[in-house]
Image: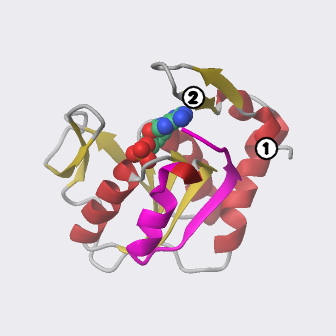
Amino acid sequence: MPLKSRIRTIPDYPKPGIQFRDITTLLQDAFGFRKLVDDLVQPFAGKRIDAVAGIEARGFIIGGAVAYQLSTGFIPVRKKGKLPWETIGRDYELEYGTDRVEIHRDAVAAGQRVLLVDDLIATGGTALATLDLLREAGAEIVGCSFVVDLPDLGGRARLEAEGVSVLTLVEFEGE
Ligand code: AMP
């Protein structure tokens, strides 16, 4: 499996029990980077998409390349307090505490067809909060795409229960 073998696993990072799936080794590989972008773009080629929304920070790298290939705009979804103008946001639960995703108030036009992109889906908390936020802003979500799925954590199923189609390229068991 060419993509999977290029992803590095770091045990017990950032804390004991977590297997961190490090995509930097995939991104630094010319074949791997092109292949992952092509595989994320191909199912949407020829479909009407107005913008790709990428989640900070690895979703910027992947989402930016996908947006370029699809000839769409790009919407940066940032963590709390990083955007310079007026924002709308959504808080979501982490294992300890909460986090927040934000976009500029005018980042999405009503009815815009948006593809959501991030590097990895685990519990789906980040993606679900972003989905809610984009929908509140008026977006129609065309799909949610990730390089890595951790199916044991159930994020993909939670997104599909919200009625969105989910594309993932690589799966890893466990957390
Ligand atoms: P979640 O909200 O639980 O779906 O977590 C998704 C976000 O956390 C993504 O932006 C990932 O970059 C990061 N993340 C969660 N678990 C891992 C993991 N095992 N390896 C690498 N990144 C992870």
Mark 1 Cα-neighbour bin, 10 Å: few <14, some 14–19, many ≥20: some
Quadrant of the rendering where the C terminus is positioned = top right
Residue at image coords 35%, 59%: 128
Color scheme of the displayed model? secondary structure
Determine the residue positioned at 53% across, 73% down: 165
Residue nearer the viewer, 145 or 155: 155
Q: Where is residue 63 in the image (x, y as percent from the top left)?
A: 54, 50
Name the quadrant containing residue 66: bottom right
Disc 1 on helix, strand or loop? loop
Vertical order, 92 against 115 (above or below) = above
Q: Residue 29: where, in percent of width, then height?
A: 79, 31
Q: Mark 1 points at which residue?
A: 3
Q: Give the range drawn in magenta.
A: 153-175
Residue type pointed to by label 1: Leu
Question: Looking at the picture, how far across and down is residue 132, in whole percent?
Answer: 27, 64
Residue at 26% from the left image edge and 61% from the top image edge: 133
Q: Does the magenta stretch include residue 19?
A: no
Q: What SS does tag 2 mark? A: strand
Horizontally, is 153 left or right of 81 in the view? right
Q: Can residue 55 be seen at all in this image of the molecule? A: no
Height in image: 157 above or below 29? Answer: below
Q: Does the magenta stretch include residue 155?
A: yes
Image location (x, y in percent) of residue 105: 18, 57
Q: In which quarter of the image is residue 61?
A: top right
**3D distance between C-alphas at marks 1 and 2:** 16 Å
Please tell me the numbered disc located at residue 20. 2
Report if the beta carbon of the residue with label 2 is closer than 8 angstroms to ligand 1: yes
